[in-house]
């Protein structure tokens, strides 16, 4: 695999970005320089003047498109006054309110005021964060850059004010629309939270008043329908008469999964969803046998009173998830159809963490599936697409993204991190055109318009990544966008089947960085399973360890088996043994996933029982130092480290951090 090697400065900035950095008044890291780094307000004003002369088009070309972006040369269909969907020649399409074919090409969060573009002002103890010292302007001069209680500051908003003047909000949104049209986009997709810029969009809603267990909504709660309808009524009243609305959306990435069923077994007795679960088990097994699944004697009362998480048989958990999904989607679909029958409802954006039972069971009630995936090779969507084909429900990818290291912004995932800004655009081409070729795909929403703040959107370990088409200093990434524009001009033709999709011959060759070498350098080349990826998120769960390896859950869905971090040649390492450092999820059965195997010839391996010494214990993970319990055989030269995945919903539960070689004895 070709690695994209980072410069020493880029590696340093990636580390600093998660450890507390110094930024200038424009929100740029001070420890790194790059072409186009903003030095003065005058540069920003010059950008505004130059772009104003370039972005002269403010609407779709009326000779080619209707006012919604629908193609005039692709046939005319019923004009309903609202967006709808239609299957044409075996392929799903959106149809604009004026009756023209439309393939959605969107970008999320075009409003600088979206919460994820701001950064916390205060750190632990309520004091101003030292990395922001001297960079925060007077709130009286920049009121639009602070939230209501001044606990968050928006460098992007301050830069827009410097660039466009006091009326910067209106000018920034107008510029965003002109940019999107110039770059071949036709939608502001999702995460608008009520912002409308004259392009088709989705309207999001997260319920605030319904009962939950954890993040999950309880659709069996007696007050669920009434509370949900009150909130939907407010959403509908705002958007019912807007023809630019493509569809309503609710509860991003928030369906039930198999871990949630464990949570449900330990939920309070008065939770309606738990009562439904218990009654299902009693109906199937009888009261006494059902109680034994909980490790209890007794019956329904004892099961409801149980507050210890229990792992139920997978088929039972799947049945409970399916039934709950049907009820949830049926209720919400009925409310939307009653309050606004003219508009579509796409429900939640789904991601690979949710069970497919939840997603598929909603099919009869939704107009399309919304899917989120941050992986250049799209293994989760492609792996589940046969199920979507059977259901014949179209899908739109509402979040996907590609990042590059540098400018103080570290990679978020290995699966979507590339080496350069141009390669971000090439990755966009590979991802979108491959999926657009599928008959069920009706469009995309790229996440997101601007970069996140280098000082993180939240603490202690929030996102601060180069997701954007535009920097926090309101400068577009021109090298990336040159490639993005190539695909945006072709996506409709690719979806129709008139043009073949662009594809990278070896997509994995674009992924990875020097960070990967740090983790896998002691393993033999080619000995790491393809499903093993880096995890760079939430280091506060892992004793501050920022770079770890794990099994990519999207790549192993429904594929139990053994997956290997790699093989060590003890002779080449001049070692007699090895100590593995790993973090294991704090749940029963996880230690049994750890694999250590030995071999004399690197072909025939036999298991070795592990000895596990605990280190730091956190709220969700415990650090372990793992060695062979017994002495390795004298003939052993190779040691292989991996995980045994029997439950693919927990494939990520073992996180590998590194190796310590035990020196040969003299």
Image (cartoon, helix red, strand yellow):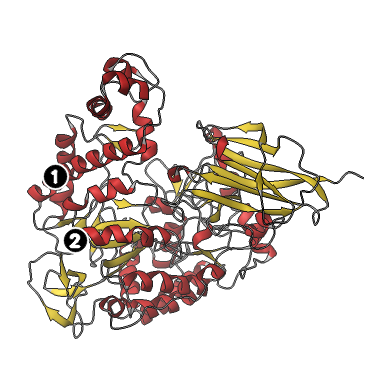
| Front one among 243 and 276 | 276
Residue under numbered circle 2: 245
Quadrant (top left, top right, bottom left, bottom right) of the C terminus: top right
x 13%, y 58%: residue: 343
- Of the two numbered discs 2 and 1 on the same chain, state the one appearing first in sequence: 1
| Front one among 491 and 201 | 491
Q: Are marks 2 and 1 in contact (CB under 8 Å)?
A: no
Q: Where is residue 575 in the image (x, y as percent from the top left)?
A: 81, 49
Q: Where is residue 516 in the image (x, y as percent from the top left)?
A: 63, 58
Mark 2 Cα within 10 Å, few/some/many (few <14, many 20+)?
many
Quadrant (top left, top right, bottom left, bottom right) of the N terminus: bottom right
Residue 117 appears anywhere in the view = yes
| Front one among 251 and 435 | 435
Q: Given the current orientation, which residue lies at the most extreme top position? A: 298
Where, by quadrant of the figure, is residue 284 drawn? top left
The disc placed on residue 233 is 1
Q: Position of residue 535 (x, y in %)?
A: 55, 51
Where, by quadrant of the figure, is residue 277 drawn? top left
x 36%, y 14%: residue: 297
From this view, report whether residue 507 is shown above or below residue 300. below
């Amino acid at each position: 695999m070709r690695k994209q090697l980072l410069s020493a400065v880029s590696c340093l900035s990636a580390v600093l970005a998660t450890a507390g950095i110094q930024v200038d008044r424009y929100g740029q890291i001070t420890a790194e320089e790059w072409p186009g780094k903003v030095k003065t307000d005058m540069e920003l004003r010059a950008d505004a003047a130059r772009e104003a002369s370039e972005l002269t088009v403010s609407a779709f070309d009326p000779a080619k498109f209707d006012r919604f972006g629908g193609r005039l040369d692709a046939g005319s269909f019923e004009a309903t006054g609202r967006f709808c969907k239609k299957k044409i020649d075996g392929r799903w399409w959106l149809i604009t309110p004026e009756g023209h074919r439309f393939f959605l090409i969107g970008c999320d969060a075009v409003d600088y005021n979206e919460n994820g573009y701001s950064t916390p002002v205060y750190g632990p103890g309520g004091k101003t964060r030292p990395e922001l010292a001297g960079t925060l302007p007077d709130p009286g001069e920049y009121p639009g850059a602070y939230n209501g209680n001044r606990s968050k500051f928006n460098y992007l908003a301050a830069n827009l004010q410097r660039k466009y003047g006091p009326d910067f909000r209106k000018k920034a949104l107008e510029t965003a629309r002109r940019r999107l049209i110039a770059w071949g986009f036709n939608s502001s997709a999702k995460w608008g939270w009520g912002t409308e810029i004259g392009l088709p969009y989705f309207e999001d809603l997260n319920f605030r008043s319904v009962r939950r267990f954890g993040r999950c909504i309880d659709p069996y709660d007696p007050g669920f329908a009434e509370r949900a309808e009150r909130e939907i009524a407010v959403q509908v009243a705002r958007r019912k008469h807007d023809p630019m609305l493509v569809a309503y959306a609710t509860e991003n990435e928030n369906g039930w999964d198999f871990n949630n069923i464990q949570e449900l077994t330990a939920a309070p007795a008065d939770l309606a969803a738990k009562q439904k679960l218990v009654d299902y088990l009693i109906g199937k097994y009888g009261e006494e046998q059902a109680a034994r699944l909980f490790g209890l004697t007794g019956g329904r009362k004892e099961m409801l009173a149980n507050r210890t998480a229990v792992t139920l048989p997978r088929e039972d958990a799947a049945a409970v998830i399916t039934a709950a999904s049907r009820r949830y989607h049926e209720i919400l679909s009925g409310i939307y159809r009653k309050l606004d029958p003219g508009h579509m409802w796409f429900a939640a954006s789904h991601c690979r963490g949710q069970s497919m039972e939840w997603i598929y069971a909603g099919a009869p009630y939704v107009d399309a599936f919304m899917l989120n995936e941050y992986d250049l090779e799209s293994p989760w969507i492609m792996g589940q697409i046969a199920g979507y084909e059977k259901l014949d429900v179209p899908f739109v990818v509402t979040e996907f993204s590609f990042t590059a290291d540098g400018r103080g912004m570290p990679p978020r995932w290995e699966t979507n991190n590339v080496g350069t800004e141009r390669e971000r655009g090439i990755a966009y081409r590979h991802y979108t055109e491959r999926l657009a070729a599928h008959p069920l795909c009706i469009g995309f929403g790229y996440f997101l318009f601007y970069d996140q703040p280098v000082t993180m959107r939240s603490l202690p370990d929030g996102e601060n990544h180069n997701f954007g088409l535009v920097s926090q200093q309101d400068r577009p990434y021109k090298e990336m966008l040159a490639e993005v524009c190539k695909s945006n001009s072709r996506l409709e033709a690719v979806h129709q089947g008139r043009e073949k999709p662009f594809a990278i011959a070896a997509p994995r060759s674009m992924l990875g960085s020097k960070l990967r070498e740090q983790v896998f350098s002691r393993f033999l080349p080619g000995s790491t399973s393809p499903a093993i990826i880096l995890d760079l998120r939430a280091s506060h769960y892992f004793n501050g360890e920022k770079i770890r390896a794990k099994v990519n859950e999207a790549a192993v869905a429904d594929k139990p088996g053994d997956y290997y971090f790699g093989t060590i040649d003890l002779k080449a390492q001049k070692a007699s043994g090895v100590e593995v450092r790993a973090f294991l999820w704090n749940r029963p059965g996880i230690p049994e996933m750890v694999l250590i195997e030995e071999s004399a010839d690197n072909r025939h391996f036999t298991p070795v029982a592990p000895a596990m010494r605990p280190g730091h214990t956190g709220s969700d993970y415990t650090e372990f130092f793992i060695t062979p319990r017994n002495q390795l055989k004298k003939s052993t030269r190779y040691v292989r480290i991996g995980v045994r995945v029997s439950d693919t919903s927990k494939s990520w539960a073992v996180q590998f951090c590194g190796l310590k070689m035990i020196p040969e004895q003299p």
